[in-house]
C-alpha cells in the first residue's frame, strides 16, 4: 500500500504517517476492496492496489500522486462529499455511504464507502481510514428490480379483478388496487389479517381456493356465494413455492361473477319457461292432431268408399276433390307437427328398407290429376344406375318430394314439372341421392329466395295473392333435409322457372348373403283377400269407414268397442291380425297390446300381428307403440294404399307360415 510520507504544517493539513503503518500495509495489500487513508482536507495518503484499479489508475502511487481533491476528482456530485464529511464529523465514522463516483477516464460507478477517524494520544484527528466497495452491479440490479416492481405494480393495479397475495395460513400480504378499492381498505388495514376476517367471517369458506391450492400444490378454481357481500365470486388460486420446495405464498384472482350468475339463472328460467311453452305447445298439437285426425279418418274413409261406388262423372269429380282436400289437410297437419318437432329438437330419422320406384309412383298417383287439370306435364325419371331398394327414412323422403312437387305445380300454369332422382355413390354401402324438382313456373326473385325457408311466409304475402298455401312447404323441407344430414339449393329465374335440388344420404340394403332384415311382416307389393281382422275402435264413424274399406278388399272384419272387448273376442275366436286404436275407453290400445303379449290364456295367439291404427302422430309415438309390442303403425287418416300395403304384408307372412306348417 503506497503512502505519502511528506510532513506539512498546519496550513496544508498533512500529517506524518504513523510508525505502525507498515503492518497495516501488509494486511490490506491484497484485499479485494479498496482501502485508503486520507486527510480530512481531501488528499489520499495511501491506497491499496484494488482502490487504484477501481478508480482507473495504473498503480497506487499514481492515484496518491494525482488525486489532490477527492471531492472534485472522485465524486460525481461534490455535495455528496459534503454530506459524507458532515456525517463523519457528527459520529466520528461513516458506514455504507453510497455515492456515484468517477474514474480517471470520467466513467462513473457506484460505491459504498465506510470510514472512521484516527486520533493521536491527545485526541487530535490525524486522518481518516476506510474502505470502498464497487456496488455498481448491486445498484443496477436494484434499479432493474425497482423497474420490474413498478411494472408489476402497474400490471396488478390495472387488472380489473381483485388479486390477493396470502400466506398458506390465509394471512394477507396485500391486494392489488382493485382489491383495496373494492374493500375500501389500505395495505395497512389488511396486512397480517386472515382473508375471511376481512369480510366479517370467523372461519374460512367451506370450499376455499387457497386451501385447495395448498392441499394439492396445484392451481385451484372455486366459485362461492359470499352471503356477507351478497356476491358470487370466482376464485382462482396459484401456489408460489420457495427454494425449499414449500409453498410460501398463494396468489388468488377474485372475479365478481354475480352479474353472470344472475344472467345464467335468468337464462335457465327463460329456458324452463320456453320448455314449458314447448311442452304445452306439443301437448296442444298432440291433442289437436288426435282430435282432427280421428274425424278426418272417417271422412277420408267414407270418401274412398264413395269413390269405389257407382257414381256418374260429376259425382266422381266431387268425391275426388273432397279426397284431395282431405289429403291436403292431412299433409298440412303433418307439416305443422313436423315443424314443431324440428323446432323442439325432437325430430328423429327412422331408417327402413324401401323400393325407390315407390317414390315415383306415389308422386304420380298424388299429383297426376292436379297436373292434368292445370294442363301441366308431370314426369318422374329415376336414373338407371339407381339401386332398386334403399335404406333410409322413406316417409320423410315422400314428405319432401310431395312438398316440392306440390309447390312446383302450385306456381306453374304452363309447361312441365319434372322430378329427377340420381344416385351419387360414395363407396361401400353408402350413397347420396340427388332429388331435383324443376318447373317452368313464375320463378322467384333473387331477393325473395331467403324468405322461402321461413315458416308461414310466402313470396307474395298480400291479400290478393293468387296461390294458396300456408307457406310451410320449403320451410319444412329445409328442416327435414337438415335433420336427415343433407342439403338443399334453389336455382330460379323470374318468368322462367325454378329448380330445387336436395341431396340426401342413404344406405344400400345388405346383400342376400348378409341376411337382409325384412320389413315388419316381409315385403310384398301384392294384396290378397281372406284376412280375419279384429278392429278395435271406439269411434262409430271410423268403425264403419275402416270396416267397409277392409271388406271391400276382401277381408272379414269384427269390430270391438274397446280393448277389453278385443281381448274377449281374441280369446274365443280366430283372427289373423288386430288393427288397434290407441285411445279407447275401458282399456286403451297400449294396455290391450301389453295384455295380449303377456297373456298365458291366448297361447300362440299372443304373437298375433297388431297394427297401431291411431291419430297419435307426434315424434316418438310410432316408436312407443312398436316398443310395447305392436308390429306396424298407421297414422290417421289412413290412405287406401297404405292400408293395402300393411294387409299385404300380413297375408304374405300368414301364407309363408302356412307353407312351413
Image (tube, rainbow, N blue to C red):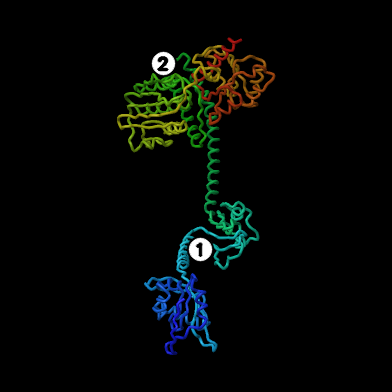
Residue mark closest to the camera, 1 vs 2: 1
State the residue in front, 156 or 633.
156
Which residue is drawn at the image coordinates 54% and 51% (left, top)? 261
Q: Is residue 330 left or right of residue 103?
A: right
Q: Nearer the viewer, residue 622 or 47?
A: 47
Does the image show residue 302? no
Q: Measure how far apart labels 1 and 2 are at the Cα level.
A: 93 Å
Residue picked out by circle 2: 313
Could you say where residue 602 lies in the image, as x and y percent from the top left? 67, 18
Quadrant of residue 443 in the image?
Answer: top left
| Element assignment for label 2 | helix
- x and y, in percent, of residue 119 in the image: 52, 85
Residue 164: give x, y in percent of width and height. Answer: 55, 60
Residue 254 sits in quarter? bottom right
Camera-side residue of 277 and 78: 78
x and y percent of residue 287 in the render? 55, 32
The local secondary structure at tag 1 comes to: helix
534 left or right of 346 in image: right
Report the front residue among 3 and 621.
3
Residue holding disc 1 = 177
Let me know if residue 374 appears in the view. yes
Amino acid at each position: 500500500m503506497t503512502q505519502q510520507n511528506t510532513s506539512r504544517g498546519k496550513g496544508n493539513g498533512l500529517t506524518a504517517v504513523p510508525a505502525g503503518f507498515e503492518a497495516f500495509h501488509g494486511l490490506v495489500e491484497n484485499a479485494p476492496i479498496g482501502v485508503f487513508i486520507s486527510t480530512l482536507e481531501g488528499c489520499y495518503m495511501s491506497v491499496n492496489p484494488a482502490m487504484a484499479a477501481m478508480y482507473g489508475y495504473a498503480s497506487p502511487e499514481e492515484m496518491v500522486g494525482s488525486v489532490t481533491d477527492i471531492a472534485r476528482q472522485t465524486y460525481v456530485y461534490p455535495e455528496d462529499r459534503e454530506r459524507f464529511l458532515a456525517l463523519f464529523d457528527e459520529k466520528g465514522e461513516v458506514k455504507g455511504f453510497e455515492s456515484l463516483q468517477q474514474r480517471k477516464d470520467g466513467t462513473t460507478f457506484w460505491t459504498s464507502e465506510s470510514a472512521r477517524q484516527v486520533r493521536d494520544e491527545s485526541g487530535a484527528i490525524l486522518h481518516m481510514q476506510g474502505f470502498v466497495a464497487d456496488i455498481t452491479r448491486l445498484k443496477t440490479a436494484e434499479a432493474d428490480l425497482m423497474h420490474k416492481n413498478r411494472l408489476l405494480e402497474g400490471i396488478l393495479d390495472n387488472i380489473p379483478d381483485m388479486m390477493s397475495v396470502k400466506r398458506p395460513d390465509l394471512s394477507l400480504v396485500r391486494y392489488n388496487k382493485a382489491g383495496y378499492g373494492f374493500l375500501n381498505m389500505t395495505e395497512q388495514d389488511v396486512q397480517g389479517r386472515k382473508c375471511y376476517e376481512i369480510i366479517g367471517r370467523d372461519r374460512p369458506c367451506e370450499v376455499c381456493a387457497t386451501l385447495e391450492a395448498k392441499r394439492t400444490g396445484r392451481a385451484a378454481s372455486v366459485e362461492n356465494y359470499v352471503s356477507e357481500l351478497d356476491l358470487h365470486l370466482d376464485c382462482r388460486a396459484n401456489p408460489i413455492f420457495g427454494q425449499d420446495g414449500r409453498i410460501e405464498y398463494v396468489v388468488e384472482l377474485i372475479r365478481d361473477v354475480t352479474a353472470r350468475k344472475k344472467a345464467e339463472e335468468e337464462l335457465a328460467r327463460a329456458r324452463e319457461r320456453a320448455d314449458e311453452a314447448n311442452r304445452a305447445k306439443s301437448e296442444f298439437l298432440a291433442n289437436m292432431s288426435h282430435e282432427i285426425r280421428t274425424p278426418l279418418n272417417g271422412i277420408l274413409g267414407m270418401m274412398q268408399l264413395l269413390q269405389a261406388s257407382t257414381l256418374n262423372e260429376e259425382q266422381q269429380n266431387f268425391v275426388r276433390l273432397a279426397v284431395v282436400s282431405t289429403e291436403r289437410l292431412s299433409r298440412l297437419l303433418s307439416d305443422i307437427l313436423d315443424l314443431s318437432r324440428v323446432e323442439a329438437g325432437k325430430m328423429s330419422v327412422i331408417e327402413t328398407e324401401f323400393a325407390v320406384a315407390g317414390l315415383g309412383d306415389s308422386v304420380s298417383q298424388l299429383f297426376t290429376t292436379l297436373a292434368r287439370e292445370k294442363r301441366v306435364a308431370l314426369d318422374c325419371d329415376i336414373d338407371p344406375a339407381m339401386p332398386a331398394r334403399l335404406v333410409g327414412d322413406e316417409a320423410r323422403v315422400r314428405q319432401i318430394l310431395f312438398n316440392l312437387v306440390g309447390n312446383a305445380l302450385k306456381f306453374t300454369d304452363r309447361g312441365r314439372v319434372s322430378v329427377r332422382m340420381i344416385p351419387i355413390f360414395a363407396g361401400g354401402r353408402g350413397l347420396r341421392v340427388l332429388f331435383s324438382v324443376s318447373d317452368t313456373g313464375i320463378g322467384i326473385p333473387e331477393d325473395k329466395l331467403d324468405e322461402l325457408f321461413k315458416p308461414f311466409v310466402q313470396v307474395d304475402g298480400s291479400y290478393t295473392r293468387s296461390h294458396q298455401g300456408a307457406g310451410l312447404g320449403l320451410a319444412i323441407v329445409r328442416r327435414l333435409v337438415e335433420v336427415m344430414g343433407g342439403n338443399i339449393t334453389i336455382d330460379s329465374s323470374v318468368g322462367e322457372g325454378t329448380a330445387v335440388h336436395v341431396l340426401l344420404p342413404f344406405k344400400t340394403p345388405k346383400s342376400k348373403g348378409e341376411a337382409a332384415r325384412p320389413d315388419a311382416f316381409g315385403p310384398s307389393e301384392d294384396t290378397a283377400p281372406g284376412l280375419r281382422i279384429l278392429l278395435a275402435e271406439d269411434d262409430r264413424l271410423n268403425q264403419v269407414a275402416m270396416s267397409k274399406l277392409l271388406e271391400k278388399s276382401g277381408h272379414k272384419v269384427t269390430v270391438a268397442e274397446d280393448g277389453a272387448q278385443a281381448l274377449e273376442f281374441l280369446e274365443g275366436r280366430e283372427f289373423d291380425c288386430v288393427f288397434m286404436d290407441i285411445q279407447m275407453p275401458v282399456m286403451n290400445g297400449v294396455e290391450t297390446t301389453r295384455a295380449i303379449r303377456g297373456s298365458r290364456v291366448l297361447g300362440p295367439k299372443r304373437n298375433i300381428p297388431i297394427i297401431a291404427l291411431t291419430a297419435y302422430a307426434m315424434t316418438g309415438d310410432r316408436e312407443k307403440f312398436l316398443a310395447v309390442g305392436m308390429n306396424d303403425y298407421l297414422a290417421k287418416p289412413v290412405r287406401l294404399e297404405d292400408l293395402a300395403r300393411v294387409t299385404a304384408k300380413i297375408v304374405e307372412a300368414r301364407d309363408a307360415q302356412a307353407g312351413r306348417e
